Amino acid sequence: MEDRRTAFAIVLSIIVVMMYSQTVLTPPPSTQLPQQQSPYPSAGQGTVAQPSAGLTPTTPPAPSIQSGSTLTTITADQVDAAGSVRVRTPVMALDISLLGARLRKLTLSRYAETLGSENGINLVEEEPNHPFPLGVYTHSDADGAVLYAVTSLAGVQQTADGYQLEANEGTITFTGTHPNWGTVSKTFRVNNDGYLIGIDVTITNRATVPLSLEWSHYIPTDPARVRSDPWNVTLLDTKGSISHLAPDKVALGITDKGILQWAALGDRYFQTALISKNPSTPFALGRESNTMTVRNFGTPESGSFLLYAGPKDQQKLKATGFDLHRTIDLGFFTFLADPLLQLLRFFHSLLDNYGLAIILLTLVIKLVLYPLTAASFKSMQKMQEVQPEVEKLRAKYKDATELNHAMMELYKNKGVNPLGGCLPMFAQIPVFLGLYNALLQSIELRHQPFAFWITDLSSPEKLILFGIPIPLMIVIMGATMIWQQWTTPSSMDPQQKKIMMMMPVIFTGMFIIFPMPAGLVLYWLINNITSITQQIYLKNAHGTHPMIATLVTSVVLFVLGFVAVLAS
């Protein structure tokens, strides 16, 4: 196999991988599906339970629901009329509706909704008139119309606008009456610095089937949002096998998914996961229109559940336990992506700027891989030197077998390895893809600035000139790619070289059409500039050693980045 074919295959493979990440792993927005029969049961109406002595309960106006009626839909007006309570911890705020004791909002106070926003991101997003999450279900009943009251507190202080956690851990209990279940109690357990919430449910009248707790979430359909924050469902079974599913791969209706350790719904940076406290607990998964649903089952009279609702931060997930860090999918080369991500965090701890950390990490990788780069370049130079003789052989031998035999003899006599220019490139691909996935999935880059107009390394960069947004880094990156391709030794014929020269243009266009996070573009740009320096000095047999030139270039690039940060 000739090196030009292999080189073309390498470039094409990288493009396919990146296109796959942006189109398959980031699926297009789902279309509105035909309405199916609702998998959600009717919700029996209940009455407000009396609070325990000494506790002042919330006293919302009664919702306009007739006693003893059953409802297939709870309207927003009814939820508003019932009222809600707010429970705050240092890291989140829970807005719990008294109608159904379900979450109306779950706000993460340490993560802004958008860049510069004072509002925390809300993990509850529902379709109009669709049940809010953390509802309790049995086979034919639900607590959606049960009017709850706060009846017990521990470690939680009542304030003017809700409840505030005042200890390391706290509980708040809601109690109501259901026509079939009798008294139903739902207790929320929160802690001081974590994203794990406990939910305990009990009913006095034993049900005929196990009760279940449900988390549901509306999957957004806006194309830009779907592309920037792709949703998926992640399941971990009791054997440790993990599955990542796109939303459209989940069947309509509620279907049994067997015994799982947990089931998670999330986008690129945040997730909610129902976690089993019992190794024999079954789960069910479903979809209605564009709403995803996960149910975790208890016993016919009670259930004790865990919910993780927070960032897809690897360190926080590992600290939480339950192997939740496995919801972060770093791809096939996780074994490389993980240490690269750890090194990126270390550099950030030294520099306090993720842009500088990316530059330093890129330069370190280029220095480490320099021997492979040099070997590849020298092999391509040798291939270029024997190209005139190869063309003579092509003119002489018309039979493919004879031509291949003659070419192999030529390569042997000249000491040329036809694969020598490509094998080192193949060796670098796992590192590239590992770092690519590490940067793409890293919540650490979310809303993190670098310098000047690059205010968010997790979002596409655009410099506004005369009211026109210009992806300046991508344009410069494209120019460096063209320069690099033009100066790379090649044994291709002129027509093939023209085709290869189109690859940087296609690559740049792909980055513009499918905007990449600024952190990824910064990595690619620094990588290209360093590669060009190495090529220039590798071509020159005399003078400064390429490794020295690489070191000097690395220092210059880092200093320029540091100055840019200071000047911003």
Image (cartoon, rainbow, N blue to C red):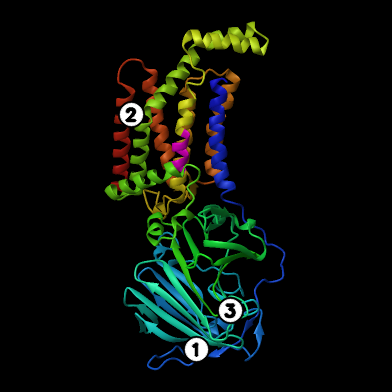
**Quadrant of the snapshot with the N terminus:** top right
> Regarding mark 3 in the picture, which secondary structure is present there?
helix
> Regarding mark 1 in the picture, which secondary structure is present there?
loop
Residue annotated with mark 1: 60
**Label 3 – label 1 distance at C-alpha:** 15 Å
Q: Residue furthest top?
A: 396
Kind of residue sitting beneath label 3:
Ala
What residue range appears in magenta? 429-436
Image coords of residue 34 (percent x, y) = 72, 64
Image coords of residue 519 (percent x, y) = 42, 46
- Check if mark 2's residue and mark 3's residue have beta carbons within 8 Å: no
**Label 1 – label 2 distance at C-alpha:** 69 Å
Question: Residue 15, located in which quarter of the rendered image?
Answer: top right
Residue annotated with mark 3: 76
Residue annotated with mark 2: 550
Kindly report the secondary structure that dominates the magenta region of the rendered protein: helix
Few, some or many residues within 10 Å of mark 2 (<14, 14–19, 20+): many
Of 421 and 251, nearer the camera is 251
**Label 2 – label 3 distance at C-alpha:** 63 Å
**Is residue 483 visible to us here?**
no
Q: Could you tell me which residue is drawn at 47 percent across and 37 percent down?
A: 430
